[in-house]
Amino acid sequence: MNPGERAAVVVIGAGPAGVGVAVGLARRGVGRVVVAERRQSVGGVPALYRKESGDVPTFLLWTRGRVLFGEQLAERLAGKLPAAGVEVWLESQVIEIFPREKRISLVSPMRGKLDLLAEAVVLASGARERTPAERAYITGSRPGRVLFTKNLLELAAKSTLPSAESPVILGSDLIAYALSAKLKAAAAAEAAIVDRSRGPQCSLPARIYFRRWAKPSYYHAHEVRVAGRRSVSAIGLPDGRQLRCDRLLISGELTPSSELALMAGLRVELRSRRPVVNSSYQLSEPGWFAAGNILGGNHGAEWCYRNGLRVAACVARYLRSVRAAR
Amino acid sequence: MVAKGKLLYDWPGQGCEPELRLQNSAQLAREPYDVAIVGAGVVGCALAFRLSQCRLRVVLIEKHYDVGEGTSKGNSAIIHTGFDATPGTLESRLVTAASSQWPALAQKLKVPFDPCGALLLALDDAQGAQLADIYKKSLSNGVEDVRLLAPAEVKELEPNAPDGVRGGLLVPREAIVDPFAAPIAFAEVALANGVDVLLGLEIVGVENPEAPVKTLVSSTDKRIAARILVNAAGLGSRALADCYGGGPFDINPRRGQFLVFGKYSRGLLRRILLPVPTPQTKGILVTPTIFGNLLAGPTAEDLPLGAPDDTDTTSEGLQAVISGALRLLPGLQNQPVIAAYAGARCNCAQGSYLIRYNDGHPGMVTVTGIRSTGLTCSPALAEYLLEGLAAHCGLKLDPKPDALEGRPESSWPGWWSRPYENAEILRRRPDYGRIVCSCECVSRAEIIDALNSPLKPRTLDAVKRRTRAQMGRCQGFECQIHVAEIISAHLGIPLGQLTKNGPGSELVAAA
């Protein structure tokens, strides 16, 4: 194993929140800032919302009244990093964190397995879509052509957006509605939206924007049974109706990616998986912070970036006080 | 391991390279096989493994696109001691024999195995009164290392056992195992020893069951000649028996639903927790998995005859699993669930372990009703079948001196011994440090190793069962498409044509 390296701050995740934290810290000149990103590029989930002809822009900058593609937003964010002098370690998977020692263990193809010691660490690992088992209302078989929104976006970026005759989206929040617009733009048939909630989990303006008012939608679905052996063929609703389905999308319902914190014994609310933070975004162990969608919720890239900047201010204040005490 | 046998897929479409495809029967040997085993679940694979150590020509035929795709993948992954079996039955004899073979066998086959022990909990006075009987039953089953425990001892061994526990029975040698690796390992060694393995080939007819050399016909009209046919088709054994006029028996699949809890919950438990069985069922247990999760289940739901493929989960079933599990381990409340699955036990209405030699016609062998002990029993059952085949079907068992009995060191799965922990391995092949599945820390190189492994897995599910990529808490959210891309690039198969579990489950449907 390589000997441990040292940094002033390590940021885990290079999505909008992680970039915000890193840029904010670099501007304040706190010392060496390292961002560990498991993927090959910076930008996180927004980068998957590619700009394609005829496509619907899916990121809304409410504060500036502008609409753009996630990809464009991610590029802008990534552009800020070199100027700020932040080190970004790509393809670097953090496998374990040690809160007491302020140490993280990571694996990367170039560096091998190594430990990084820091004065402060920020978890900005974002959120993921809840799995069928976590949602608990999705039962039945486990066939092919069932994808998370993220998987569909990745597949679309690599080949072509798979067409579908009768797509069904499980979930009704902003992610689900943006996905239905994306599918429609790709000439798939109109998707049915199914959720266990009483109504759409997405704001009225966003629904209007995504032109998804009067499309087939089914709420109060307290159990959805997936049918199909090799690939999904239908889904059964509680009232006995069967919806034809040749592509099932498990969409939205984000849950924080807080596993590192949970496994390391930092305080995490078990039900919501939210790490417990104080008013300065500090976790249950001093020197450990969290930023962006890992804090819970379903925020856009702009919010996450700004939140990252705010967390950076808190981290800088912490570093000043610790360094002063020394 | 150099394969002496052939591995071929009967695969319509482009999800698999042309070199691996079975195009016509001429690709197979002209001489008839001595034994054709139909069904590559853990029983069929174990039999192929044992037969491969003799000078015989053997073919293993499976309708799915990987081995172990049926009941063998949907169980509780426990190697039983048989302490609670009905004494004197064939099942009990085989379980007892197999239980003592497994520790050494797992080491030879490189199948992850952990004899963590089990604790049967009595939760009320009525159950407490039954413990003594179960203890006596264990002794008569030859499981003599069991021990009756007082409530305080139970709490000492398992601090998270419920407070009102009345006592327990410790079964030290109950073990957990990687259930996917067992059939894979058996089949890989069989293949290396010269057994031909045909995947994706469904046998739907036997042309001349009365002749000394029978012709098996597949749904795609491929023909395979063999002297002996062993029907190890599990839930499909009735349909296959109908092809050769096998005697009467009925399969009543009994479905079991399970819930998998995340690694965070692993610390709640050290051993398998078992409830006191009722006359109807063994009940819902909670067990650690060899992968570092907790598992709760199974339900016992009798399905109607002719519903062999129903491995759906239901909300009532999963609710029953939760409430059963909470009785044994109240600390499971609110713990993160990561997956739910179901399997169907091959329950035979005419009795368990129904084995008929020369069933209907000479050379036809039916092996069915293996219920829920197939994984445990497989090595002993294979041995038992070998003797039977020699005695009843005249099969000559000449040992093959150069036959392999296990897999090489390199076959240990990556999750069991992390390649990235070894700096030298990482330096030689940096892809071992390129983590693709973040939940289970599976690297790109491990996925490629799996693709190159002897049984040439070609579906996402088959790769998942070998590497654990997609089997963690996010269930493929993070890595499904990345894994698919790696497979696509390595094999030259278009991304959209990759399948979850064989033709018909392509990522992108044919236009």
Image (spheres, coloured by chain):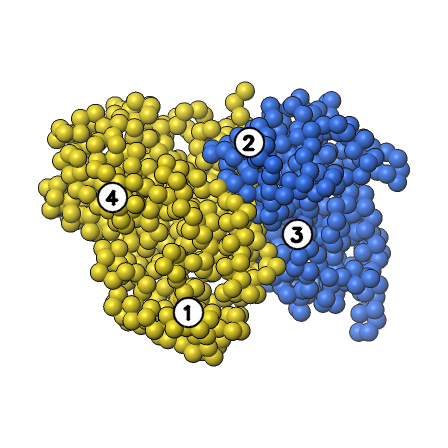
Chain colours: A blue, B yellow
Left/right of residue A198 with respect to residue B269 in the rendered view: right
- Per the image, the residue denoted by label 2 is A234
Q: Secondary structure at mark 2?
A: strand
Q: Do circles 3 and 1 both sit on a common chain?
A: no
Residue B367: image tag: 4
- For the residues labelled 4 and 2, the Cα–Cα distance comes to 35 Å
Q: Looking at the figure, which quarter contains the N terminus of chain A?
A: bottom right
Q: Amino acid at mark 1?
A: Gln
- Per the image, the residue denoted by label 1 is B127
Q: Secondary structure at mark 1?
A: helix
Residue B394 in view, yes or no: yes
> Please, which chain is the residue tagged with disc 2 on?
A
Left/right of residue A95 with respect to residue A82 in the rendered view: left
Q: Secondary structure at mark 4?
A: strand
The nearer-to-camera label among 3 and 2 is 2
Badge 2 vs badge 1, beta-carbon distance below 8 Å: no
- Per the image, the residue denoted by label 3 is A257
- Residue B17: percent from left, percent from top: 41, 28
Which residue is located at x 21 percent, y 45 percent? B355
- Residue B431: percent from left, percent from top: 52, 46
Q: Residues within 10 Å of mark 4 (few under 14, many from 20)?
A: many
- Compare marks 3 and 2 and give the one earlier in the sequence: 2
Badge 3 vs badge 2, beta-carbon distance below 8 Å: no
Q: Amino acid at mark 2?
A: Ala
Compared to residue A150, the image places residue A244 above or below, namely: above
Q: Amino acid at mark 3?
A: Ser
Q: Residues within 10 Å of mark 1 (few under 14, many from 20)?
A: some
Which residue is located at x 66 percent, y 46 percent? A128
Q: Nearer the viewer, residue B133 or B406?
A: B133
